Amino acid sequence: MARRYLRQRAEMGERELHGRAGRAKGASSDSDSDAGEAMRLFCESIADCQKCRLAKERTQVVCGSGNAKAGLMFVGEGPGREEDKTGQPFVGAAGKLLTQIIEAGLQLRRDDVYITNIVKCRPPDNRNPMPDEIVACHPYLLRQIEIVKPKVICALGKVAAQTFLQSDEPIGKLRGRVHPYRDIKLIATYHPAALLRNAALKRPTWEDMKLLRKEYDGVEL
Ligand code: URA
Ligand code: SF4
């Protein structure tokens, strides 16, 4: 049920995207130069969201951070404790590792990419977000993708990968290759929190980052 809804949303979103791209030629309030402002307004608009039960226990909505016209977007699962406290995505232990992957691994600056999550509010006790919560929050992710228009999306971990790809396959099966997602290249890899628990996942993650960098701008690491 959640899956069918998401597929419908994806098809709708696709039509919206194409319609917009047609209109956006020349000047538009949504053109690249206005992406930062569009994102700021968007994040402001969801700050009081009550669309799912995650609203009850969160401290604040964690919308996203980084460059609103980035060519590369990272999407995690949902805010953790530190993120809920600060309002910024990926600032705890997993976030520090993600920053290292971006800076030392991909040789990009964290500020140059856009970072967000599948759900924007912290699930209690860091449980996985439930399907209806993912569905409730999904239009927000689609709007962010519409604003940023990334060339490549990196889905971090099982929840993000399965949501984008509408798949039940484990992350170990979804990683390691490029998936078409609309006109965007989607690469799934392990969540940085999983790397902190299991160092053996670092090597395949590094392979995924090499693939990502190649798809991003043809640079081989
Ligand atoms: N884990 C996530 O999936 N997202 C965050 O923002 C932080 C930790
Ligand atoms: Fe709204 Fe998303 Fe937060 Fe649910 S998780 S309350 S849909 S912003």
Image (cartoon, rainbow, N blue to C red):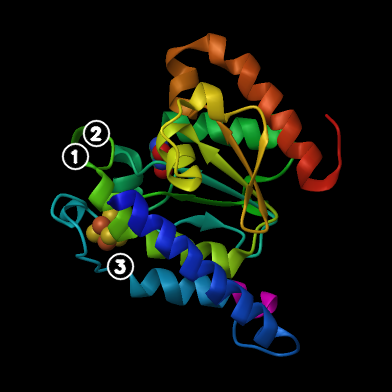
- Residue, disc 3: 47
Q: Could you say which is closer to the camera, residue 4 or residue 197?
A: 4
Residue drawn 39% across and 56% down?
6
Residue 52 point in image, percent of width and height: 20, 58
**Residue lying farthest right?**
219
Tell whether label 1 touches label 3 (CB within 8 Å).
no
If you read the primary sequence from the N terminus, does the residue marked by circle 3 or circle 1 appear first?
3
Residue 137 point in image, percent of width and height: 33, 58
Task: Kindly report the distance in space between the C-alpha atoms of the residues bearing marks 3 and 2.
Answer: 22 Å
Q: Amino acid at mark 3?
A: Ala
- Residue, disc 2: 127
The answer to whether residue 54 is magenta is no
Q: Residues within 10 Å of mark 3 (few under 14, many from 20)?
A: few
Image: magenta residue range: 31-35
Task: Kindly report the distance in space between the C-alpha atoms of the residues bearing marks 3 and 1.
Answer: 18 Å
Q: Amino acid at mark 1?
A: Pro
- Residue, disc 1: 124
Q: Quadrant location of ligand 1? A: top left
Residue drawn 22% across and 53% down?
59
Tell whether label 2 touches label 1 (CB within 8 Å).
yes
Residue drawn 45% across and 44% down?
166
Q: Residues within 10 Å of mark 2 (few under 14, many from 20)?
A: few
